[in-house]
Amino acid sequence: MSKLRKTKFTTAIRKAEKSSNKADMSSRGAAVSSLHILFWQRKSGNKPGFVTINCRLTYQGKRKDASTGIQCQVGAFDPIRQTTPKDPDTARLLSELYNRLQATYADLRITGRPVSSELIWNAANGVLPQEPEYSLINCIELFFAQREEEHKLKEITTSYFKKLRTWNDRLTTFAKTTYGKEPELEDVKPADAKRLLLWLKKEYNYTNNVAVMIVAHFKRVLNFALENEWITRNPLMNYRRKLDKYKTDRLTEAEVDTLRTAEIFAPAVEHIRRAFVFQCYTGLSYAELCRVNVNNILVDQRTGAEYIKISRTKTGVEANIPLVQEARKIIDSFADHPARARYGLLIPMISNQKYNVALKQLAGLVGIQKRITSHVARRTAATIYLKKGAPLESVASMLGHASTQVTQRHYTVMDSERVVRDFNSITELSKVS
């Protein structure tokens, strides 16, 4: 028996490739589209006198060579006709494999799935690509990665992004503590919302409002898994946040006047006093107070009134703040400050921590018993203007709120004086004679 050499096989393959389009392929049909199927023989190492028929799939210029596992005697395979004319059983096996490969290729194309030589061969032989399985930890990490992309695009603020990072760490710890080292998405149950809430309060001493925000974040993570079809139902879909309402301090108009007119002999505290009163008239937060400058002051063309226009650091929403005369006097009082000439700042500021400490000292000096902070001034501004009859929409715009609901939920205070005044303007009330 003549020895089969590699060069002989190579020559046969090349000859078959060149003549395959002209060959009689009626037993199997012509090749579909850009898929080309070629059978070729290789000497079998296990059975002397036999060769193994291999298959070469070529799709879009990329090849996949694989053994069919079909064997025949040396000389029985015809590389031109791509079959074994004298061995009907082997010819039938090759024909079935050919048709299966073509059907698999057509199915992948019709269904719009990815197509490659590797995928065609594997799918035709029952080896389907496995969908990646995502655990609960994977889901948390991927959700955070998406938020990270939003942060790079400046769609979310740095402060909120840092908050999300902390919340993700808490969820990861809770998941491993509750479900084990490798928690699955299916492990989460509706009752886990309450379990997470209690765990956050116990382990981190969070207030109820902070804890419910983290649970709501967990719900968003599971919604992310639902959108990606990793789960069929969000187990926390019925969870609703229940925030505690706290009584927040704010100053009355009389207390603001007391602060403004009080005689203070300490220059450092005097600086703090003017900054705080300015906040009470403008509603600026500490972050905006630190960066508001002369370029933020604009003039209304119709009325000639001055107003401050500045975007909120926290949300990016634009705030429109009319300048009352007392606020303008405070701006003018810093006209000679070096920071005005160098940076254009309206009011030079110290750190938020030192500012709040100084505000406590200020309250003690003027006899105000309330605990005042930078944010108290913002609430004070909203309360004073609303009590004077300013529309809720205008106050929301002054505070830089995207919705009046935020203003109404956190900044409005309905007292008896305001209710009586509002009703007295539309109807006649009973009065003491």
Image (cartoon, rainbow, N blue to C red):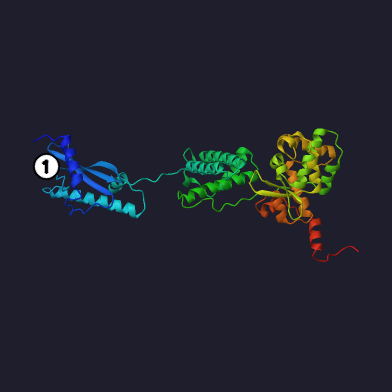
Image-based side of 149 in relation to 22, left or right? right
Image-based side of 398 in relation to 106, left or right? right
Q: Nearer the viewer, residue 66 or 56?
A: 56
Q: Position of residue 106 (x, y in %)?
A: 30, 53
Q: Which residue is mark 1?
A: 75
Q: Mark 1 falls on what kind of element?
A: loop
Q: Position of residue 432 (x, y in %)?
A: 89, 62
Question: Can see residue 7?
Answer: yes
Q: Residue at x 71, y 39 (%)?
A: 290
Q: Position of residue 19 (x, y in %)?
A: 18, 47
Q: Nearer the viewer, residue 144 or 399?
A: 399
User: Where, by quadrant of the figure, is residue 70 drawn?
Assistant: top left
Instruction: Give the residue type at disc 1.
Output: Gly
Q: Quadrant for the N terminus, please.
A: top left
Image-based side of 176 in relation to 119, left or right? right
Q: Quadrant for the C terminus, please.
A: bottom right
Q: Residue furthest right?
A: 433
Q: Is residue 246 above or below residue 361?
A: below
